[in-house]
Amino acid sequence: MADELKLEEFGALAQAIEAEVGRVIVGQREVLRSVLICILGGRHALLEGVPGLGKTMLIRSLGAALDLKFTRIQFTPDLMPADITGTDIMEEGEDGSRLFRFHEGPVFANLVLADEINRATPKTQSALLEAMQEKTVTVAGRSYPLQDPFFVLATQNPLEMEGTYPLPEAQLDRFMFKVRVDFPRPEELIDILERTTGADEIWPRRVANGAQVLQMGRLALTTPVATHLVERAANLILATHPQEAQATELVRQYVRYGSSPRGAQALVIGARVNALLEGRLNVAWEDIEAVAPAALRHRLLLNFEGLAEGADPDDIIREALHAVSRQPA
Amino acid sequence: MASLAAGPAGDGPRATLTTLLQRWERRQRWQRTWMGLPRSLLPGLALGLALLLWSRLRFGTPAEGFLPAMALLAGSGLMLLLARIWLPPRPTLALARKFERDFGLSERLSTALELMEGRIHSSAELTPLQIADAGNRARDVDVTRQMPLRSDRRAWATLALLLLAIGLVTRLPAPSVPTDEQEEAQEAAIDEAAAAVERISEEVASDTALPAELRQQLQRELERSQALLGQEALSPEEAFAALSESAEQFEQQALALEESIRQQMQALANAQQAGGEQLEAALRQLENAGSLPPGDDVAGRLEQAAASLEASNPELAQAIREALQALRDSQLQNASNAAGLARQILAQQQQQLARAQDSQQRLRAASDQLRDSASQIAQRSQAQPLVSQERMQQQPGSGAQPQAGDMSMQGQPQESGAGQRGENPEAGSLPGSNTQAGEGEDVQAGSQGGQPGGQQTGQGQNTSEQDRPGLGGQAGDAPGGAGMEESFAGVQGAPPGQGNNPDGLGQREFAPVYAPRRLGASQGPELYLENDPGDSPLMEGDFAPNPSGEALVPWNEIYGDYLDAASRALESDYIPLGLRDVVHDYFSALEPGR
């Protein structure tokens, strides 16, 4: 293992990454921070937003700044699992012998952009499951390890739902964060126009590499968390379950099933990384508050009433956060 | 991104953090103590005040006896506060979690403590940095700014008010609550009154000069009072009322008897005047010599005397006529006999009148005695002098005899004015009032005789009242009947030994005002208005001696002053609530031009 990253280097690298991507992506600081937290936490992120908000550009810029091997998969209904994972192709040798040779798919990269992931069929979507969780690809009985670091950053359009295949809960749960990409503010929109409509094309410089990303992640995950904060995180997860005593009013009304333990992991991991990115040497409650919506919003299964009334999971999470924060230390 | 640079953890970072936390905790305990101090004292003091009030009102307990108990109650509250704040121990980690939340330290302290205790782990690089960072941040906390010693102003103000109330209550005189000695004194006064009533009853029964009907009526009244005074658990107010009522009854009967005597004496005087003031001498000579004395038409004058006596003493008139007829018929013996009979009848009438006067005086004395007994009961029912009484007693020239102020306002006929010195410039100067300015120094503000046309004319020395302190001779100046009633002058005078202060003892400067409830009545209680020195005077103008009895100031000029005085009285407690409308209507009716 390479030499451990110093704390000062972590801060400098994080600042450099955010600054470099920020040269290309106007605004969207919170989106960038969330994606960076996922990358440093070694997890995957799902970006949700209407087309044209720079989701793909953000991920491409991040790949360029981190000097990671970047691939992009445009998910369509006719996309097949082999189109993602790769497949064995029969080749004929010089001696005329024939053999199957595995041709790696686009998943074999450090940073995989699964664009409009909900347009592919569930079978194809599930092809990513093993890659995301096990970081291996199994084809024809043989497993192929993926490169480290490996991140899947998927996007989906929340509006055009016709002809789409919503991600199954199991796959959603494998995304550490579900990041909402909002429409830029007016001044940001003007800045976008100024930067992107000229002849000059701005592209981020490389400020880090895969190894450094891994080192940053390892350092971030050592950020200490006080026990009572871990207890509060657990209470927060329990508060999203309507059958639990800690459940809030909105949870009881609109939630069919709450967050999984993987959500609690995402919460604490995200808080650890966020604390260090904030320059704090320990996790604070505000770190949990900062990452909770992204970590939990896709893990709440709304009931019929919640779906019918268009309940916003973020409101439910905010109420749960408020309830937990009032619990005695 | 904030700087991640932090110095290495110093020596004993745990001790440093612990010391800081303990210092903060002490500060916070002081803060809570200071904040809760007034609130901790309030319940005890409030309870003490309530008990003090209840005890003083119920039993008249001295306030000094309650102060230690009140201090104990307040001290108990304080001890509870101190115990609640200072006794419970709090673990260091709990302190850290609390203060890092209060001071915005973002869980630095608890994380550092847990790292030091080994409860959580981090990298070798981060751990000392985090602990040092926590220590630095903790040292940067300005605890005096974060935890200022605020005071609960509302609670302090409430405490101050409570202490002020306690101070006032302790300084106020104890209300009149009868003690055992006072109750004994009251019972003794009632017993004395009962004995006095019995004595008066015996006197009335043996007074043959009284008409039988009147005697029976008075005896019934006295029996009623005796029965009432003999009741168990009789309150002083009831005894006072009964005696006052009896005294009033005696007073009225004395007045009625006085009127009867006056009429008879008037008739006799008329007869003597008609008979040339020699009626008795003429009758004596006729009896002895069988002839009339020489003079101008003596027989005619005797005839006129007989005519004037026809109504009051027909027997005497008849005897005179028979004597004259016998004389005309030259029946000298018969004339002599008839004249002797007439003279005998005349002498009997004079004796009867004298006895009737004695009875009338005895009735008045009995009335005074009943009033004295009532006053004694009233005095002894007062546990302690009220503030007003104390204040009034301090005024110079206070009356000779204390009087229960509360009872005097109960509609009892407490006639004030007796004992008032003649220095009162208002005496006899009120328009429409019967000014009774005696020849002596004593002058009574004679509001009672305010009815125009009073019959007390002439200068009369009230011989029957001479033994009453402060009640001088009364010389009524109101026009009216002929003034022969020397013996009866001043019968409407006030009882002895009372000041003019309706609230109790002593004299005060008052302006007499007719009590509305006396409208249409011959006499009754009077209301007195206290002069307001800061306001315009109640009376204006030149109030020189006014022998003619006519008002020197037109009514419409002083009506406003009277109205002001009445308004002030209406706003005060001098006039009972139920009578205020009557007073208002009375003065409204007096408005000039209506």
Image (cartoon, helix red, strand yellow):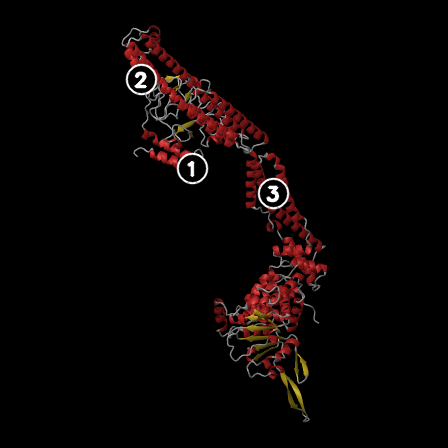
Q: Left or right of B29: which side holds A22?
A: left
Do the residues indicated by labels 1 and 2 lie within the same chain of the protein?
Answer: yes
Amino acid at the residue labelled 3: Gly
Residue at the disc numbered 1? B578
In the rendered view, tell whether residue A238 sits above or below residue B282.
Answer: below
Disc 2 and disc 3 on one polypeptide chain: yes
Q: Answer few, some or many: residues within 10 Å of disc 2's Cα (few below 14, many 20 plus, some between 14 and 19).
A: many
Subunit of mark 2? B
Residue B275 image-quadrant placement: top left
Based on the displayed image, in which of its 4 quarters is residue B79 positioned? Answer: top right
How many discs mark residues in the rendered view?
Answer: 3
Q: Which residue is mark 2?
A: B308
Q: Are marks 3 and 1 on the same chain?
A: yes
Q: Position of residue B563 (x, y in %)?
A: 37, 33
Residue contact between numbered discs 2 and 3, judged by CB atoms under 8 Å: no
Q: Nearer the viewer, mark 1 or mark 2?
A: 2
Name the chain letter of the residue that bears numbered label 1: B
Q: Choose the circle earlier in sequence order: 1 or 2.
A: 2
Three-letter amino acid code at the position of disc 2: Ser
Cα distance, mark 3 to mark 1?
41 Å
Residue A299 drawn above or below residue B344: below
**Residue hosting label 3:** B44
Drawn side of residue A17 relative to residue B257, left or right: right
